[in-house]
Image (cartoon, rainbow, N blue to C red):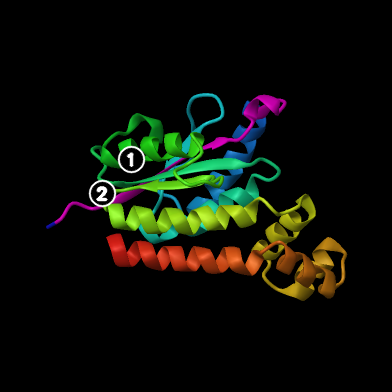
Amino acid sequence: MAAKLHAVLIADVVASTLQQSLRRRLGQTLALASRQHLHKKLIRLPYAITAGDEFQTVCLSLAAVPQLILDLRTLLQPLSLRVGVGIGQIADRLTPPVNRLGGEAFQFARKAIDTAKSGGPFKFDTLTFFASPNATFDETINLLYGLNDTLLAGLTAKQWKTVAAFSHTPELAKTARQMKLDASTISRNLKRGYYWQLTAAAKVAASLIERSLG
């Protein structure tokens, strides 16, 4: 029987030196994110902050990775994240803290985040990178996320706020009441904020991961 594959996510904050009290803010937000993502069954272990502005976790399943990435980007606004995902085996028993664990998945995740920090392999900026034992999968998913990240760069703070509210309560009327705006404004902000493209890309990415590595 083939050894189980795990997905390790490592992220850091873009331009972190420009952020005030980042470590404290990041700690508070990630404590909330850990509770939410454990409840949603997106992660296996709570987030652990490692060096400076970097944090990591082990995803509950491979197919959960795309939704987890989108959730993190939404929850940590206005911070912009670089994300590296490594898919492979984990050598240790899965017990917290995550930064004490090791194995192939962590090595791939380190390779992925370092590639994201260097700007990626494309002639356009990308904030998300995957590394796994499957080179064909890596090529496809990294192009998908390169294009996805191009959309992210165009979102305004107002659009992110609408995306966050609608993600929490995915009904136009309820989101409109919560934000004290009319439904047409919510719909327009979602469209201009590429919400439908971002969520569709996450679903396609999850399907690609399951077909290729699941």
Query: Which residue position is annotated with label 2?
Result: 133
Classify residue 109 by image quadrant.
top left
Element at badge 1? helix
Element at badge 2? loop
Q: Which mark is residue 33?
A: none
Q: Are marks 2 and 1 in contact (CB under 8 Å)?
A: yes
Q: Amino acid at mark 1?
A: Phe
Classify residue 168 by image quadrant.
bottom right
Above/below status of 169 relative to 151: below
Q: Is residue 96 visible?
A: no
Q: Nearer the viewer, residue 41 or 154?
A: 154
* Residue 127: x %, y % from top left: 54, 45
Query: Which residue position is annotated with label 1?
Result: 108
Q: Which residues are magenta?
A: 2-22
Q: Going by the image, does 79 lie left or right of 2?
A: right
- The mark nearer the N terminus, 2 or 1, is 1
Q: Nearer the viewer, residue 97 or 204?
A: 204
* Residue 46: x %, y % from top left: 47, 41
The crowding category of the residue bearing disc 2, from other C-alpha atoms within 10 Å (few below 14, some 14 to 19, many at least 20), is: some
Considering the image in quadrants, where does the C terminus appear?
bottom left
Q: Which residue sits at x=60%, y=54%?
A: 150
Q: Which residue sits at x=76%, y=52%?
A: 156
Q: Amino acid at mark 2?
A: Pro
Q: Which residue sits at x=46%, y=68%?
A: 204
Q: Which residue sits at x=48%, y=39%?
A: 116
Q: Is residue 110 visible?
A: yes
